[in-house]
Image: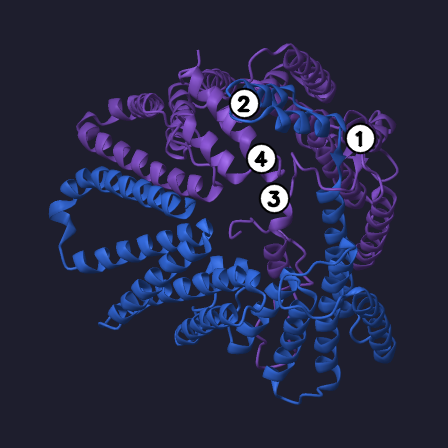
Chain colours: A blue, B purple
Amino acid sequence: MNKFDVQATKALLDKNLITENQFQEINSYRDLNIFSLNAELKLFLYLSVLLFTSGIGVLIYNNIDSIGHIAILSLLLIVIAVCFYFCFKNSKGFQKAEAVFENPVLEYLVLAANVLTCIFIGYLQFQYKPFGTHFGLATLIPTLVSFFCAYYFDNKSVLAIAITGLAAYVGLSVTPQDLLNNSNFYEDQTLSYSAILLGILLILWTVYSTKIQLKTHFNIIYLTFALHIISIATISSLIDYSHNNVWLIFVAVLAASSYCFYKLSHEYKAISLYVFMIIYAYIGVNISLFRIFESIDFSDVWVLFVMILPIYFIGSIILFIKLIKTFDKETAV
Amino acid sequence: MIVYDKNLLDNLALVEEAKSLQSGGFISKEQKDLIKKELPAFKRQSNILVRLGFFLLGSFLYSSMCGVISLLGLSGEKFFFEICCYIFAAVGFGCAEFLAYQNYYEHGLDDAFILGALLNVGFAIGISTDGSEIVIAFFVAAAALILYKRYLHLLSLLACCLAVLALLFFGMLELGDVGKAILPFITMIISAVVYFVAKKTITNLERSYYYKGLLWVTTFCLVVFYLSCNYLIVRELSSELLGTEVLPGQDIPFSYFFYAFTFLVPTVYLIFALKTKDRIMLWISFLAVGFAIFTVRFYYSVLPVEIALTIGGIILFGIAYFSIQKLKQKETGLTFKPDRINNSNAILNAEALIVASTFGLKPEVKTESSMEFGGGGFSGGGSGENF
């Protein structure tokens, strides 16, 4: 334990900022000398699920022709059934509000069962093509299973898988690394329209689920996905559609989404949404500025341009400090 | 040496304490807000995202300022090139000082200027000495130490530790083959000595200002101590530096010592961490165990990757499950109950993100095969920025 924490508590007492009773309570709690392994052991569980499911996935992928299909399928099915059996046995059934398992191990069993189910369906489709050439169905069914698990067992990790599945059904890859690399829109720019629509749908869904009070703590995950999908799609379109005035439409979309998320981040008091909204809006503004000044011949004025740059950044910094300050003030109430 | 107002630093510690007491449920939110309002504070960003954003903006500003200076000095040509980095570094120090007087502390903007100045010191010395590593490492270490002492900037301290390590490394290389041969042992001994000195200083510390920094130093020493005599590192470094090749059937000198070290030290760390309730050491011991397993797999492919992953997962699950069952009922000491005051839940919040990056479904390729699973690339390197 850190002796300076104890000192700080004492100083708070000396300044009359906490009461004598509270001080006593804190001290008696510190005397228990608790060393909690809660986070560490949960992380172990989590890692074990990651390792196990990755192992199984690679195992099946590598040996797809050598081991008997029936053997693999039945083994997978047994493991899935066992996992789900424990989950259903200990679950309190569906609840509209936030619900947690009494035993944290089960949370990770749900995750394992869900990932294995996805692998199972994928393998089934690869080998026996039950969905024929309807590849969409092969994505949609794991997605639906994931949504069911996420809502029934109240599991955020599974919800994240479900959302990526939904996006995959539309034709997008929204895993965080692909979003960052912006790898979606290289081949097919029209995908950005579906991306924007998907983002709007996600936002509408959060509005609806707030109305009927269904798992409102999921909303922040939906909104995070929606913000990144919409913003990255519009920004990538802003860069690509340079030849005509189509980019003006995307400026309007970005402005609308920024305003929308400005409101939403205040509503949910979510600084992560707010910061990313600002960053995307800033990038958008800069691209637009660049577009407007594109016609100017820079060879004449570049000295002036370099001189102005620091002032521009100082202005931006002051603006950002103001924005963050107002956010803190408004959400503190 | 510290540039900041001591009262503000004390207040910061009090507000942080109030925050953790509030999250532990000992005091109400109103009380915490009152404490926050009562005590004047730094301009500081506690949210890492916001701080990162300001760091980026600060870096843009710093580089644009350097751009303006280069524009003015462009007529100086070669002479300007030789001194430009000194000027940039001076500008960085000046801005950092200015921000410190404006009470910016751990804000992001100050980080940009402090780290930028440090980088420019490195470049400047490099240009003046034609890239002599020892001199660069020495001056960077000195500058970083001064920056840490003055601005209590922890990242500078980390830079200082790295620079000292580099100094030691290049210094030993200067000594020739003998130096190269005893490099692991010297590093091990020095990191052990520094660790105990830092530990001792912490217990004798009266004020809390340098506490965090010393904690970082001990952490750094623990990591370096383990890596210094890890079998993988020693073998790869010796083949790199001494040019010795390990033939089949042979092994590096003292290989038994290095093997023993690779496996014993993590265990010792683990036991010691649980005994002294040292969370940082506990985490390092986990990482060290992981690295030890990696070391073995690097040279001996005991099992195919996928089977190792599957079995590893099952074993890890077993360990976690039985530990939870065992610790569940305990109320004091080592326990599974979340600690009300110091909880390390931040890492668990990133779970959903890591799952999405590892197992996220991708749109299928229309030609053949079904969807591609994330199972192949087990990187799991979620950077944890969305949550």
User: In screen coordinates, is A233 left or right of B253?
Assistant: left
Tag 3 subunit: B
Please, what is the three-letter code of the amino acid marked with disc 4? Ile
Q: Is disc 1 surrounded by few (<14), some (14 to 19) or many (20+) residues within 10 Å?
A: some
The type of residue carrying mark 3 is Ala
Decide which of tag 4 and tag 1 comes sooner along the chain.
4
Residue at the limit of the structure toward the bottom, as seen here? A132
Is label 1 on the same chain as label 2? no
Q: Mark 3 points at which residue?
A: B346
Q: Nearer the viewer, residue A42 or B176?
A: A42
Q: Mark 4 lies on which chain?
A: B
Q: Please name which of the two marks, 3 or 4, marks the residue nearer to the observer.
A: 4
Mark nearest the camera among 2 and 3 is 2
What amino acid type should be assigned to the residue bearing mark 1?
Leu
Question: Which residue in the rendered view is the most extreme toward the left?
Answer: A300
Q: Quickly name the residue at label 1.
A: B274
Pointers 2 and 3 within a single chain: no
- In the rendered image, is residue A93 in sight? yes
Residue A13 percent location from the top left of the image: 56, 21
Same subunit, labels 1 and 3: the answer reads yes
Q: Above or below — where is B145 with respect to B298?
A: above
Residue position marked by numbered label 4 in the rendering: B27
Element on which disc 3 rests: helix
| Residue at x 44%, y 49% (from the top left corner) | A271
Q: Residue A62, located in which quarter of the rendered image?
A: bottom right
- Whether callout 2 and callout 4 share a subunit is answered no
Q: Image point 71% across, 30% down: which residue?
A: A29
